Amino acid sequence: MKTTLVIMAAGIGSRFGGGIKQLEPVGRHGEIIMDYSIHDAIEAGFDKIIFIIRKDIEEAFQEIIGDRIEKIASKLGVEIAYAFQDPDRLPEGVVRPAERTKPWGTGHAVLACKGILNEPFAVINADDYYGKEAFVKIYEFLQGYTPEKGFEFSMAGFIMKNTLSDNGGVTRGIARVDENNYLIGVDETSNIIKTPDGAAVDCNGTLVPVDAESYVSMNMWGLTPEYLDLLEEGFTDFFKNIGDNGLKAEYLLPIHIDELLQDGKVSVKVLDTKDKWFGVTYKEDKDIVVQSFGKLLDDGVYNEDLFSDLAK
């Protein structure tokens, strides 16, 4: 069964301090984080990749990754497609506020794939490194897809302490799960910081401890083609409830999935992964990420020629 990896690469990356953070080199030979995700997904069995980008970064994206990955993918029998997140792609009757220039969030990003995505898929952030284990587990879960299971989803469950930044607070979706590791709910929590004892939420200067061993969502989901219709319906509802917040409101994937979960419309299996997440949330994170990828090469997790072990 064809299985697709959807990479959300349209984010502006405001906290990175300018530039397109998804395209920053972090590997010893100029690789970017996406290269490792693509490698791990193909190694796990994914055979189609959709990049979600914006029209205004298309040229830079093609120059740094698109053209190169298309050549690699062609040799490996992997299909490449593009979807464009357009701020003006809105439900009928909705008009974008003139001052609103940025897209409408991760839910809106995935919705851009409607029409080119007809198979079970994983969705990830472009600027996050997830590790090999999560791709294998989500791929195996998606291989069990049938139309009768169209509303059975999965989520890679990362341990919170493995996802924190040394350089400031981060936002994480803290997952609540039942005894069978099915998701009960996701609590979007801002300003989680690493502490000597684990983790805490910084509430206006007061640190409130949180469980550093709890699962968090890093926006790595295993979803089905049936989800796109639900996503489109939810986008219409989003605008019905947006009120006067049209300049800042975002239609976010984890929030929408949580709403479906609370309404009993879907199930979400949390797939345990012990891999350490890397990401460039702050500009200061880059040096740590570069060192981390260097160690992965030294340890033999990846080849110096990254994709050479995938050659047919």
Image (spheres, helix red, strand yellow):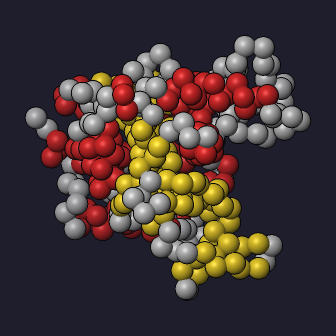
Q: Which residue is most to the left?
A: 312
Q: Which residue is most to the top?
A: 92
Identified at 76% across, 28% down, the residue is 239
In depth, the one of 291 and 217 nearer the eye is: 217
Give the image location of residue 262, x and y in percent: 61, 45
Q: Quadrant of the C terminus?
A: top left
Image-based side of 44 in relation to 25, left or right: left
User: Is 293 situated above or below 123?
Assistant: below
In depth, the one of 198 and 102 nearer the eye is: 198
Give the image location of residue 228, x and y in percent: 51, 26
Residue 92 appears in view: yes
Image-based side of 198 in relation to 95, left or right: left
Residue 39 appears in view: no
In depth, the one of 248 and 146 nearer the eye is: 146
Image-based side of 308 in relation to 33, left or right: left
Give the image location of residue 146, x and y in percent: 32, 28
Query: How many numbered tags mark residues here?
Result: 0
Q: Which residue is most to the right?
A: 244
Identified at 27% across, 37% down, the residue is 144
Give the image location of residue 14, x and y in percent: 67, 49
Q: Quadrant of the N terminus?
A: top left
Query: Would you identify the image quadrant in which residue 233 lies?
Result: top right
Identified at 70% across, 39% down, the residue is 250
Query: Would you identify the image quadrant in which residue 253 lies?
Result: top right
In depth, the one of 300 and 181 nearer the eye is: 181
User: Is 120 situated above or below 177?
Assistant: above
